Image (cartoon, coloured by chain):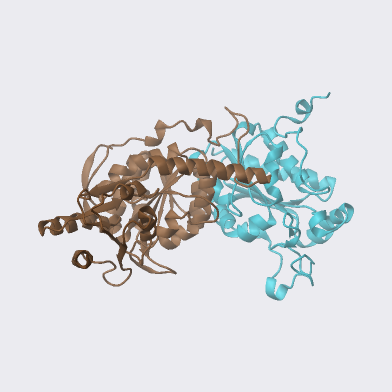
Amino acid sequence: MTQETLFLKNTETFAESLARCGVKYHFAYPITPATDVMKRMAVILPKYGGKMMQMESELAVSSALAGAAATGTLVATSSSGPGVTLMHEAIGFMCAAELPCIMLDSMRVGPGDGDILGAQSDYYVTTRGGGHGDYHTIVLAPASGQEIADIMPHGIRLAYTYRTPVLFVIDGVSAQMTESTTLPAYNDYSAEFDTSEWAFTGTQDHPKRALITGSYSHEDGYRMNEMLRAKYEKIREDEQMWEAVQVEDADLVVAAFGIHGRMCKDLVSKMRADGKKVGFIRPISLWPFPERAFAALPESVKNILVVEMNHGQMIDDVRLAVNGRMPVHFLGKTGGDMPMNTLAEMIAEADRILGDN
Amino acid sequence: MENLSAKYGKTLNLDKLTSYCPGCGHGIVTRLVAEAIENLGIMKRTIAIVGIGCGGFSHHYMDIDAIEATHGRAPSFAIGYKLCRPGNIVYTYAGDGDTCAIGLGDLLHAANKGMPITTIMVNNTVFGMTGGQMSPTTLAGQVTSTTVNGRDTSTQGYPLLVPEMMQFMPGVKYLARETVASPQAIRKAKKSIQKAFECQVKGLGYSFVEVLVPCPTGLKMSIKDSYARCGKEMTDYFKPQVFKDETEQADVA
């Protein structure tokens, strides 16, 4: 497959990016607003010699994903909140078992069965691990079709470098948006990594290997957790990703990811045109959270405004990152016919904070 | 010292002492599985995907790659694995709790998908590792630590007949229930387990063997009594038989 520019739903762009970057098998269960990923994978993966495997539940999806990932093969899944909740059993398992894979949470309104409209309601459940035990998944939040295509190779490299699941989170609004994206030519990025050192492929070329996440002695559990702690420290140190625009002289910095992060471009250019010193930080990696973007903020920044399509989840990480140096304000909404704040509402809130100064 | 692997083959690791309790039927079933793998010459490409519970120990006594899955999910793990590496031989091994309590959904869908994978379900009618609680196969009236007055069929139903649920699935190509209650029964079980693996080697479809075993510890019985129970009360209800054998058709692998 050669490089081409297509006008696609971003869920379809996600599928195309997976397949073009080397994903061979995709496991999924239908759920709005993620179903278009598995639909497109069912059509395109056979062309790459792979297959989309529909399973009977997200629990089975994630378990099959783990079994597949244990072979070293690049595999993926796509789902939304309620499905991701079911997958957490195997996500935690894959973190403990050090198995790489790519996942998507096309986020919708929760909790419970929730609503099929887009949201950013899964920030907590994805960045805090989600299941039992001390673990994290790497969480990436692209804000456009182009960014999905552009960071997919990086996502795959992260998954194999650290041998851990990489979870993309995209608010359902961005996920269902249709826009032009330049898709890459086919290249299997997982082929850069030698999985023969660890993959469970039979004892043809190695002595017995056993994938064990349980503890046969209490020391085993301690060792596994210390191993994971060291890995997560390294990821925190090396893999923070963000976009920062015009924060150097800003009075107010807006922090938002996904579609609200994308809207910040317009917010800043409009407010700067009115002579207001506003900048923005758009976290791209939600875990590890880009603390360094906030640590580097200049003295001029007096306030931070966090905007989310939820009732305040990422704001916790922003507050931890600034550690009381400045007030952190919140604007957020979830659900309704318009399940997010408009640009006008964001600007009005920014103006209110600036006026209070 | 006698070279045991020359006599018994390389699959079974005879240097390891098992951690099964005295009298446990798992030791026999584990050995039968190892012998089937050895006889078919598939050791180097065979993967054990074991469940949670005493069955999870089984791979430790074999020199083959293994994955200890999440509780009940071994069949789904096996599907993902087999899709990626169809040339490998993948079997799941777990007890009745893992296989047909928490894992029944995964099991039946895996069976119905009909991919060439093999499941060995070791049925001792209790959760053994946690100390003898009721499982779906606990007999009616059987006393366990969670059915202190016996299994009450009005709220807990009757013991689950698992292979019977798969009989009419066309993708299931070998289906049997065996027991280790006597030497004769063990010989039959050995044959069925080997056929189940052969079924996969030939690429025919899904294969399943339930093996009835005693759990003297979980049942709080003597070894002798627990074997007698296995050969009588258990087999009266769970009738050993080959439900389906379509392994004689030509290879499709």
Residue A213 lies left or right of residue B7; in this view the side is left
Residue B13 lies left or right of residue A207; in this view the side is right
Residue A22 lies left or right of residue A57; in this view the side is left
- Quadrant in which the C terminus of chain B appears: top right
- Image spot of residue A327 (x, y percent): 31, 61
In this view, A193 is above or below A18: above
Q: Nearer the viewer, residue A57 or B130?
A: B130
Residue at 24% x, 52% y is A8
- Image spot of residue A330 (x, y percent): 31, 65
- Image spot of residue A61 (x, y percent): 48, 53
Q: Quadrant of residue A39?
A: bottom left
Residue B112 lies left or right of residue B36; in this view the side is left
What shade does chain A have?
brown
Q: Residue furthest bottom?
A: B154
What shade does chain B have?
cyan
- Image spot of residue A107 (x, y percent): 36, 60
- Quadrant in which the N terminus of chain B appears: top right
One can see residue B179 in this view:
yes
One can see residue A50 in this view:
no
